[in-house]
Image (cartoon, rainbow, N blue to C red):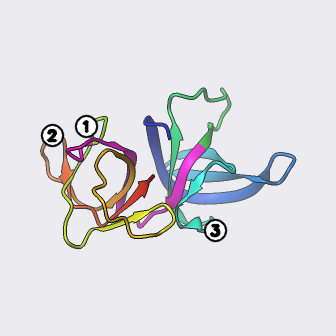
Amino acid sequence: MPTTLIPITGIVQNVATFGENCCEQQVTIRSGNDVNNFIIGTDTYVIGEVRLRPGMSVAAFYDASLPIPLIFPPRYQAVIIGRRNPSENIFAGYFDESLTAEDHALTLNIGRSTEIVTSNGQTFRCSPAGQMLIVYYSETTRSIPPQTTPRKIIVLC
């Protein structure tokens, strides 16, 4: 799993078959005035295996270390995509032993109500430190790095 994941959040405008074998889809996402296309392939982790539909609020993550075709609107290969509550943020990345993101964008404080599961929905009973995580959270402190007590953590084992 790459550690240079960049999120784009927005509303799904269209979902269409992509490629010759019908195993990929192109999802068009409007984020403000910007339009981005994401290719959802067999390697894309679709959080909760949700069926993507127009009008759905989502967060899609792409690997910034991979080349991107010079076309407009941009077309990214999605690494992770999932439904998003508009009042909530989603972060994906590697967290070290102190639960600080590799890019120092976020530090996690695990609370009693924080749900921690594996990518297939099973309860994760170990520390999520030192893992790739998908984190759902709403508020952060103004510290550097910002701290949050997440609602949910998905551990990408």
Residue 46, image x, y percentages: 57, 59
Q: Which residue occupies the foreground of this view, 121 or 34?
A: 121
3D distance between C-alphas at marks 1 and 2: 8 Å
**Does 32 lie within the magenta span?**
no
Disc 2 marks which residue?
A: 144
What segment is highlighted magenta in the picture?
Answer: 78-100
The residue type indicated by label 2 comes to Ile
Neighbours of disc 2 within 10 Å: few (<14), some (14-19), many (20+): few
Disc 1 marks which residue?
A: 104
**Does 80 lie within the magenta span?**
yes
Image marks 1 and 2: residues in contact by CB distance under 8 Å: yes
Residue name at image x 19 percent, y 66 percent: 111
Disc 3 marks which residue?
A: 51
What secondary structure is found at the residue carrying circle 2? loop
What secondary structure is found at the residue carrying circle 1? loop
Neighbours of disc 3 within 10 Å: few (<14), some (14-19), many (20+): few
N-term-proximal mark, 1 vs 2: 1
* Numbered label attached to residue 41: none
N-term-proximal mark, 3 vs 2: 3
Neighbours of disc 1 within 10 Å: few (<14), some (14-19), many (20+): few
